[in-house]
Image (cartoon, rainbow, N blue to C red):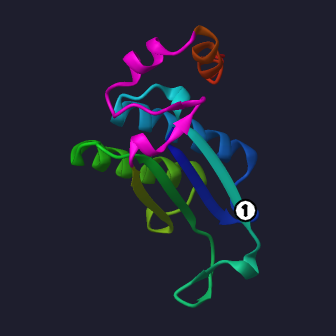
Amino acid sequence: MPTYTVTSIEGCLDGAQREQIASEITRIHSEATGAPTYFAQVLFIDVKADRYFVGGGLLRGHQVFVNGQIRAGRTVESKDKLISGIADAVAVASKLSKKNVWVYITDLLPRQMVEFGHVLPEPGGEASWAAALPDADREHMQSFMPVRR
């Protein structure tokens, strides 16, 4: 499951902005990689203003830092689409300049990850992997799909 951690100073993002960022990161990840949306999780960390340093000094103003951990094996093109799409979407949602949005992507080996009780498949193998899961595990995993409003 890709895990995106979004870090910012307390008060930089409100609830609606967080919801928009989480929705956009999930959509962009799915479109760029082909992975189902229920694989993506987005976590928000608010940092006290006196605990966020850049270049050895306290951060002045606001900045949003996104660190995404994804399964290794994605193409350069899909990662370029992913990272630029996330940077654009977070800038829009946060109402910050794109220069104040930093995005890092880290590759993790799929065979070294367990989610929903099972070792994850290689990229592109999600459908056959999900189909081979016991019914109860597959139903639990799919329960994470967003409810359409």
Height in image: 132 above or below 84?
Answer: above
Q: Position of residue 119 (x, y in %)?
A: 48, 33
Give the magenta part as a residue range: 109-134
Could you tell me which residue is drawn at 62 percent across and 70 percent down?
Answer: 62
User: As rendered, which of 131 and 27 lies closer to the eye?
Assistant: 131
Q: Amino acid at mark 1?
A: Asp
- Residue 24 visible, this orientation: no
**The stretch drawn in magenta includes residue 121:** yes
Q: Furthest-bottom residue in view?
A: 56
Q: Position of residue 126 (x, y in %)?
A: 40, 24
User: As rendered, which of 100 and 36 lies closer to the eye?
Assistant: 36
Q: Residues within 10 Å of mark 1 (few under 14, many from 20)?
A: some
Q: Position of residue 47 (x, y in %)?
A: 72, 68
Could you tell me which residue is drawn at 63 percent across and 76 percent down?
Answer: 61
Could you tell me which residue is drawn at 72 percent across and 79 percent down?
Answer: 51
Left or right position of 136 against 26: right
Height in image: 142 above or below 39?
Answer: above
Which corner quadrant holds the C terminus? top right
Disc 1 target residue: 46
Q: How many marks?
A: 1
Label 1: element kind: strand
